[in-house]
Structures are given as structure tokens and as C-alpha cells.
Amino acid sequence: MQRFADHSLPTDAALAMDAQELLGYLRNMDHDSFYPMEGILAQTEAIGDPAVPTTEQRAILKWLDAAMKDWDQCFPLEEPLATELRRLRPLVAAQAMTENSFLTPGAHPLHQLLDAIQVAAVGWQARLGRVGRALEEEICGAISASLVWFDAPATDLSLISKRMAASAAKAAARSQKMTQRLIEAEQGRIKLEQSKQQAGRMINSALRKYPAPKDLGAFLKGPWYDSAQLLLIKSGEKSAEWKHMSLTTARLLESMQNTVAEEESEAGGRQRAFELVAQLPKELEKWLLSLQHNGEAVSEALRQVELFHKQLLRGASLELEKISPIPLQADPKRNSRPDENLNRLRQGQWFILNMDDGPSLRAMLALRLEHEQRLLFANQAGIKVLVKSFAEFQQLMAAGRVTLLDSGASFSRCLARSAGVETQDDLDQLTGVAAERARLKEEERQKAERERLRLERKQAERERIELERQLREQEEIEKVQREMEEAERLQREYEQAEQSKREQLEQERRQLAQEREEAKRLQLKWERVSQQFHEGLQAERHKPGREQAAGTDEKADDAGLNIPRCSWLGFRDGDGGELVLARLAVYNREEHDYIFVDRHGMRVRQLSGKDLLIIMTRGLVDILEARSRFRDEVAQAQKADRDQVE
């Protein structure tokens, strides 16, 4: 009433139309040319009838006129369905005049019927053939059944609406099923194309690296290429199977090269060749998926590879050449900055596309191919009707040849929008619940704020506990680390001590070995000197005139040292080489010991003949004074007297 009430017309109760008269005008109106209020006024003016609808009726009729105009403009349908739907204009107005439920958008059966028809026919075109005719007949039948209400007010419009909604749902399910098949087929095609590209890149990469015999190149670009595509479709490029096949391709080409590399010996190169030849046939047979149905073809392919290997193993050279790569399609050029309107496009949206080569086309965006930058469109029957690149579709949009079609509760939304209700807030304001909603919203906000504070405190407590736990763990880690460092230090010290001990033992062992060698050498020298002395002594004893002297001579020893008694010797002790003086006092012939005294007669050393010989050999003893024995001196004096007498 606030938006559409018109007070310019007379409001006299005597001039107000009664209900039957108003329905008669609606039934007879020209629905193709006028909307309800316009049609009534056109008839009254034509016949000069001064009667007019009441102010409330005029407001409702004007509201309907605005909603229907909005519906026709925002939710247009193709002819002849648009003409068929205009037949319902009088019935819609008649229901608005007689049914209070009509004033609530979406509540009346006619609202639901028109909503269902628009959803079912948003993509309808006469060119759809049998599918289109079936839907057209269904809609025309529902419209005709509804118009019977003027003659039979008991007509169940709700039943007609439900039947139309059920029929539209079935048609949508069939269309969705066909569209899904189209999408799956297109995705399969894309996957096949991607497998071709990936398989081709893998083989081309190997061919760029290695030359190959011409026949092997034909094998790689033929059955092996087909098998690679099948494996990619089955397992994907990130699978272990694909990595294994790629490795087999490289090893196959590598096996055709010289088996003796520059850095390898001939034996090593032949050994590697034998390993490749032994492994490759099984791997090739495993991945020849395209020939698994044909055992003879597999055997023939393997036989050709084995012939090449036999030639190489016999030392023959293969005729290698650079194999041309498998031709591949170039990757689509990507638009670095796609249009913002293009980014808002979503699958399932309907469009009117004005093409150059024909009438306008109603199509749904069935699939958006981001990698290929293409858009796939289907009609209401689920059949592909158009494929455009992102760039081409952007050009159509820029030229104004693309119209986005809205759908879903279309007529009900137009009724609400025409009354000034476009959002939930508008509806709340209209119905008076805005304040209550605001109060509830504020309560929810306060509750959410309290909950947020509670969660923050709880989170802070958890963080504090977690921090303490981390600190304890850090302390434990540092303690363990210190213990480990201490253990490592002790271990190092132990190892160093053990190493020093081993080095000391080794040094002592070497010193002991040297001393043993030196002792052995001195022993040999001692034995040799002793032998020479005894031989010389024996010779002296057999000389004439020596027998008596031998009986009376008192030598100091029999060990070959021939040191007279009372001889002074200097012993070098210590590292400094200090000289210690000692006089030979006694030689014990039985013990073979030498006793040395100092100048006071105190014994300072007692050495065996062997020990004395050893230190003398080392140069640690100097004979400072060797005095002859007393008896020798007497004998020499007597001999001198005799010589004088004579």
C-alpha cells in the first residue's frame, strides 16, 4: 500500500467494482498486450465504465504489474513458451484478488508453478527437438489445466504445481546425467591428451640424450609410446610404476651405446653391458602394456632388442642416429591477467550467447578447464554445443554478446523485490522483527565476546602450561646434553689414556726388543772375545818356560779381561757422563765376580765378568791405571839382576 497505492482515481464506494465484475475484466483482458492493471483500465476506458478497483486492489494489481515486468525482463524464456506463460497473467491477478496467501511470495501454488516452469525452461529452445517438445507439452498442459479455474474454482492448483515441479526435477536429473557423461568424456579426453604429452616428453628427453638404431626409434615412438600413455592413465605420473618405466627407457637407450666408457676398463664395461642385457627384456615385457593382448608382437619387439644387444656383445658397432622427437602440441598460452567477470563464472550457470553464425544460443557452463583455459558449454539435453577459450569468451563478454541467466524461485523473488524486499533485512524491517533480531544479534555478540574472552583465558592458560612444559623439557634436554658431553669428555680422556698407554707399551716393546737385540749382539761379542782369549791363553801355556809361570802366576781372571789387581777404573754413570773412580780389589774366580773399592777401601761395585765386559764394550769404563802384580814385579827384578850378573 505504501509503495503502490494510487489516490488519483476516485475512491467513492459506489464506483468500486465488485469481485465478480473484477474477475470478468481479468478473464477477458488482452494478456499478450497488457499486464493485469493495465488490461482492466483499458477495458473500462473502452466501454466507458466509471467503476474502478478499490485502492487496495489497485495497489495489489500494480504490484503484480511491476513483478511480472521484472520477471519478464530478468528471467526471459524462449518463444513460444514466453507467449504461453503470458496466458497465466489473468489467473495470477485473480488469485491475488481472492487468496490472501498470494500476498506471501513463494507461498501460493501459482508462485511455485511459475518458479518450477522457469527452472525447467531456463535452457529450453525449440531447436532441442524431441526433448524440447516434451518439455513444451508439459508446460502447456500445466498452463491449460490451471486456467480451468475460471470455470471451476475448485481446481487444485497445488496439485498442478507439484506435478510440474516433479516433472521438472526428472528432466533436470536426466539433463544432469547427460551433462555428467559429457564432463567425464571431456575429462577422459583431457587425461588422454595429457598422457600423450607426458609420455612424449619422457621419450623425447631420452632420445635427445642418446642416439639409437632406426628400428629402435620406431619401437620407442610406436608400441612403447602407446604403453607409456596407458601406464600414465592407469597409475599417474607421480607413481613408482611411471618412474620405473622412465628409467627403463633411459637404460634401453643407454644399452645401445658403447659399453666401455672412457673411465672404465674393458672388463668393467662388458660386465655392465651383461647386466643391462640380462635385466632389460623382463622390464620391457612388463611395461609393454599396449601389446599385452598380442604375445607374438611382444616377442618380436623383444627379439629385435636382443639382436642389437648380441651385436654389441660380439664387439660389433650399431648404426646409431639421432631419432626425431615425437611431435607434441604446444602448451596453451595462459592469460596472465584474466578478466574479473571471467573469474566469476561457475559451472552450472546458464547463458544466452549471441553468435555470429546463427541465432542466439542458450547454454550452460558444463566444465571450466583451467589448465587448457577453455570453457565447455552444453544445452539442456546435456549435449556439448560450444567450446570457447578464455580469451574468446572474454571478447564475447566485452562485445555485450553474453547474457547471464538467473534461475531459482524466480517469480517469488520478483514479487518480493517489487514490494521493496530484496534481502532478509528488508523482510525483517517490513515484518517488524528487525528490532527483535537486532536485540538477539546483540545478545549473540555479547555471548560471543564472553566466549571469546573465556577461550582467550583458556588459551593463555594452555600456553602457560605448554611454556612450562617446554622449559622443563629444555632443562631435561640440557641436562642430558651436559651428561652426554661429560660422557664424551670422559670417553675422550679414556681413549687418550688408552692411546697413550698403547703408545707407551709399544715404545717399551720396541725398547725391549732393541735391548734384546743389543744383549744378543753383546752376548755374541762376549762369546767371540772369550773364545779368542781362551785360544790365546792356551797358546801361551804351551810355550816353553811358561809352565812353571802358569803354576805360580796369579792372574786377576780367566774371562779374557786381563785386568791387573789394584787397577783404577773410571765408570761413567748417568746421562751426564760423570766419572766414578774405583780400584779392582778382588777377583772371585769361583763366582767370576769383580769387586771394586774406592780410595778408602769401601766397596762401591760388584760386577760379573759378563756385565763388566758389556759396559766396557759400550764405552762406559775407562782403565786409568793398570799396575802389575807384586809377584810379577819381583820376577822382573830378579830377571834384571841375573841379566846384570851375566
Image (spheres, rainbow, N blue to C red):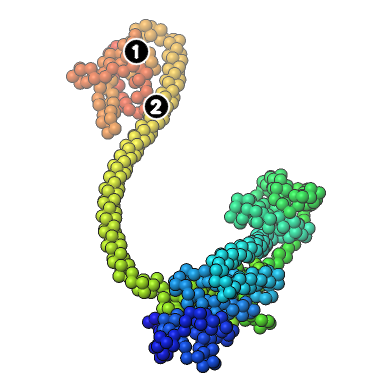
Kind of residue sitting beneath label 2: Leu
Expressed as whole percent of the image width and height from the top left, the position of residue 86 reads: 58, 79
In the image, 515 versus 128, the foreground residue is: 128
Q: Secondary structure at mark 1?
A: loop
Res. 632 in view: no
Position of residue 373 relative to residue 521, above or below, is: below
Q: Residues within 10 Å of mark 1 (few under 14, many from 20)?
A: some
Q: Which residue is mark 1?
A: 592
Q: Nearer the viewer, mark 2 or mark 1?
A: 2
Q: Residues within 10 Å of mark 2 (few under 14, many from 20)?
A: few
Q: Residue at x 35, y 28 (%)?
A: 619
Quick one: 559 or 413, which is closer to the camera?
413
**Which secondary structure, mark 2?**
helix
Q: Residue at x 58, y 85 (%)?
A: 30
* Whole-percent x, y for residue 317 in the image: 77, 54
Can you identify the residue that label 2 sits on?
512
Task: State the residue in front, 71 or 40.
Answer: 40
Residue found at x 47% / y 88%: 51
The residue type indicated by label 1 comes to His
Number of the label disc, if any, that sits on residue 102:
none
Q: Quadrant of the C terminus?
A: top left
Residue 446 appearing in the image: yes
Please state, as top left, top right, bottom left or bottom right, where the N terminus lies in the image: bottom left
Give the residue at x 31% y 11%. Answer: 588
Q: Position of residue 233 (x, y in %)?
A: 65, 56
**Horizontal side of residue 609 vs 401, given as left or right:** left
Q: For the residues marked 2 and 1, what is the alpha-carbon distance in whole angstroms?
A: 27 Å
Label pair 2/1, CB-CB below 8 angstroms:
no
Task: Indicate which disc, 2 or 1, sits on the residue closer to the N terminus.
Answer: 2
Q: Place residue 190 in its image quadrant.
A: bottom right
- For this view, does 31 lie left or right of residue 607? right
